Image (cartoon, rainbow, N blue to C red):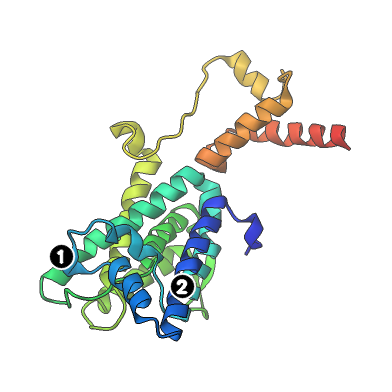
Amino acid sequence: MKPFRYLAKPLRVLILINAAVFVLAFLAQNLRNDMLFGSIVGYGSLIPAYFMEPWRYVTYMFVHVQFMHFIFNMLMLWMFGDEIAEWMGNKHFVAMYMFCGIFSGLFSIPFYLSGALNPYAFIIGASGALMGIFVAYYKFFPERRLLLFFFIPMKIKYAMWVLVAVDVFFANSGDTIAHFTHLGGVVAGFIYMWFYQGGFSKFGRIFIRPKIKVSSNKKESAGIEGVVFYIDEEKRMDEILRKVNDSGIHSLTDGEKQFLLQASDRIRRRRG
């Protein structure tokens, strides 16, 4: 895990917002400020019976009132989110996180209103959005290993479906976990990744499509490979870094990666 200051900016912002809301709720609860605590939970959580109140589909993602719930979710965001933000780019990461969080809330509403679960349940936490991010991790790094439930070594491509099976199995158990919201996050993650990995070009800019200029000029391509160098190397390097920030490292061509490494090395030597 990277130190906090080196995390992608969207992760730092998300963690700080979650932390601020948690601390406020924690203080209100322990200082017996029922009005403040009731406002945070009552107005910030997603309550299926009040599904017509649109702000709840966003605010519920940032509300945690139990310490372990908060720590676990932020730990998952820290561990998996940074690499996804680096790989996809900040814009796509934020878009996917918010889409999965909102979609997972919407997805769970019918199950609560059907009578199978309590329609006045308080759904809170970032778990739905995090399940979507975990799907992205599963797509990009299926062979990676993790300790599932902190002690079972397993590849991501298997752990993903174990988590889904657990949520399906316990969906109607009546416990305090929003399993349908988790499942909604998984569905949202696959939807977003489908668009991200090819659907954007087919259906247009439904979400965020990176602007990537593809050149058919062989001489220009050769220049990127290092035969011809830009006069202002720092400007070109800035352009490539902006592309990484917007669309992720994987969006760079081999030539751009090589140019970035060579140019940064030359600039570093010039600066001493």
Q: Which amino acid, mark 2?
A: Leu
Above or below 204: residue 126: below
Q: Residue 166, percent across and down?
A: 32, 76
Q: Quadrant of residue 134?
A: bottom left
Question: How many marks do you count on the picture?
Answer: 2
In-image side of 135 versus 49 (left or right) = right
Which residue position is annotated with label 1?
Answer: 110
| In front of the other: 201 or 254 | 201
Which residue is found at the position 29% from the left and 67% from the top? Answer: 43
Tell me the quarter of the image containing the C terminus.
top right
Q: Quadrant of residue 101?
A: bottom left
Q: Residue 235, percent across and down?
A: 68, 26
In-image side of 217 versus 272 (left or right) = left
Which residue is found at the position 28% from the left and 57% from the top? Answer: 55
Picture disc at residue 24:
2
| In front of the other: 161 or 246 | 246
Tell me the quarter of the image containing the N terminus.
bottom right
In-image side of 128 versus 217 (left or right) = left
Indicate which label's residue lies in the foreground, 1 or 2: 2
Q: Quadrant of residue 6?
A: bottom right
Q: Residue 120, percent across and down?
A: 19, 75
Q: Earlier in the sequence, mark 1 or mark 2?
A: 2
Picture disc at residue 151:
none
Q: Is mark 2 on a helix, strand or loop?
A: helix
Q: Which amino acid, mark 1?
A: Pro
Tell me the crowding category of disc 1: few under 14, some 14 to 19, or many 20 or more residues within 10 angstroms, Cα based: some
Above or below 112: residue 206: above
The answer for how far apart the CA atoms under marks 1 and 2 are is 31 Å
Q: Residue 257, percent across and down?
A: 65, 35
Above or below 231: residue 204: below
